[in-house]
Image (tube, rainbow, N blue to C red):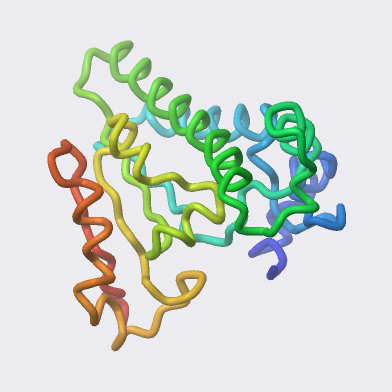
Amino acid sequence: YPPPILSYAFEGGMWEKRSELRCLDREGRYLPRLSYAFRETQDHALSVLREMARYSLDGIALLYNRRPPYIMYEQPLIDGFKNTHGQDPRELPEDDRNWLRYRANVMTDFMRRVRAELDVVAREQGREPIHLTACVLGKVDDNMYFGLDTGIWVKEGLIDTLIPYSPAPLAMPIASDIWSDPGQVQPFVDMVRGTNCGLSMNVMPRD
């Protein structure tokens, strides 16, 4: 994993002061990410989103395509999974479906908190609901690996627009190959069909 972008901006902040909130790999080594497995991380993110929402903006976009992971093998996840499934996730394949679903539930709970928070701000201001967009990875399985269950987000109405970023591995796009196969798009089309969630495929306009 690459280090935090613009590392100087992290000096003196949560990243530097609260190392216990960082993501951990299977061997228990720190990864250069804060983990959403911890309530403190979620609360911090919600406080930033709440502040943003109180300005006169039409919506907020969460860029989950940027520098995953957001949740990995932190102790609260390990303990919770053991209690539920009786297994240590570190002894399972990384793509074990029960483990991925368990992690995704944590991120979905965070998204529920985001949606509720934005709705509270909108009601306080007497305005229309604040539009929430999620930019995610371009493969359903890649999203699930990083705890992003976009299907549930759409089904529950947690987001208003879904933007799959790129079908390339880990969303590292080559502009000429963005959505070149209609089959790459179809899972997302099926996901939003019959819902109020819009779908917008990223096409790398900077190139």
Question: In front: 91, or 1?
Answer: 91
Whole-percent x, y for residue 152 in the image: 37, 37
Question: Which of 86 and 121 lies nearest the eye of the viewer?
Answer: 86
Which residue corresponds to the image point at 31% horizontal and 77% vertical from the top-left? 206
Instruction: Give the answer, above or below, for where 130 lies relative to 193.
Output: above
Left or right of 133 in this view: 3: right
Decide which of 183, 136 is in the foreground and name it: 183
| Quadrant of residue 140 within the rendered picture | bottom left
Where the C terminus falls, by quadrant? bottom left
Which residue: 36% across, 38% down? 153
Q: Position of residue 50 (x, y in %)?
A: 46, 27
Q: Residue at x 73, y 53 (%)?
A: 92
- Quarter occupied by the N terminus: bottom right
Task: Please determine whether, in this image, residue 167 is positioned above or below residue 110.
Answer: below
Which of the pair 53/186 is nearer the observer? Answer: 186
Report the side of 168 relative to 74 (left or right).
left
- Corner quadrant of residue 196: top left
Q: How many marks?
A: 0
- Taking the view exactly as shown, the residue that stands out farthest to the left is 194
Measured as percent of width and height from the top left, residue 120 is found at 37, 15
Residue 94: give x, y in percent of width and height.
67, 59
